[in-house]
Amino acid sequence: MTQFEFVLVAISIVMALGVSRLLDVVGPALRRDRRSWIHVGWVVQKFFNHVLWWWSLWLGRESRWNLPLYLFGFGGPGVLYLQAPALATPSEDAPMSWQQRFFEIRVPFFVGNIVLVAITLVAQAAVGGFSAVIPPVLLLGLLAIVGLATTDIRVHAVIVILALTVQAVGLGGALLVTPAP
């Protein structure tokens, strides 16, 4: 087993736990009497965020892994893992309104998004590749700042739609053309 495979397995476990929490909330979040499309949009975006983050780890296959890099490698997956339970309370404790729940966790959620942007930018600077990722990441950071600053439900509806679009088109497009080894 190479160093990269060893690191990837450990990080993948953390990411799988985050995805598991997101999948736990899909059923309760889609219940007609409590559904909030803003909340559902963020659950989908965070799931996609996990997938793209995991896929982007391939960029580290040539890196010389040491303890500081290993710990830094857990930064993004760690934040994603912490964001998942914020969006996904256990079904028996599910709030009466997912919209109300989202606005209760809005500040730590968007701070987490800003931290993810910072980690991504530092990682891009360290790796030196994929400059195509930087504009969509900066746009996601701007959306997080706006989300942090407002409680207007219409603005949040626009933010989640833009975040999903930026992540799918901008980041997804950039990461799907991963260079061959």
Image: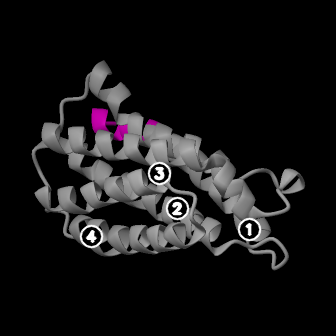
Mark 1 and mark 3 in contact? Answer it, CB < 8 Å.
no
Mark 4 and mark 2: Cα distance apart in space: 16 Å
Density class for disc 1 (Cα within 10 Å; few <14, some 14-19, many ≥20) is many
Mark 2: amino acid:
Phe
Magenta stretch containing residue 7, yes or no? yes
> Could you say where residue 9 lies in the image, as x and y percent from the top left?
44, 41
Label 4 sits on residue: 170
Label 1 sits on residue: 29
> Could you say where residue 24 lies in the image, as x and y percent from the top left?
72, 59
Mark 2 or mark 3: which is in front?
3
Residue 124 as seen in the image, left or right of residue 77: left
Mark 2 and mark 3 in contact? Answer it, CB < 8 Å.
no
Mark 1 and mark 2: Cα distance apart in space: 14 Å
Label 2 sits on residue: 47
Mark 1 and mark 3: Cα distance apart in space: 25 Å
Residue drawn 58% across and 55% down?
A: 19
Residue drawn 10% across and 45% down?
A: 128
Read off the magenta span.
1-10
Using the image as rendered, state which of residue 181 and residue 106 is in the foreground: 106
- Residue 100 occupies quadrant: bottom right
Task: Reply above or below: 128 against 67.
Answer: below
Considering the image in quadrants, where does the C terminus appear?
A: bottom left
Mark 3 and mark 4 in contact? Answer it, CB < 8 Å.
no
Element type at mark 2: helix
Label 3 sits on residue: 149
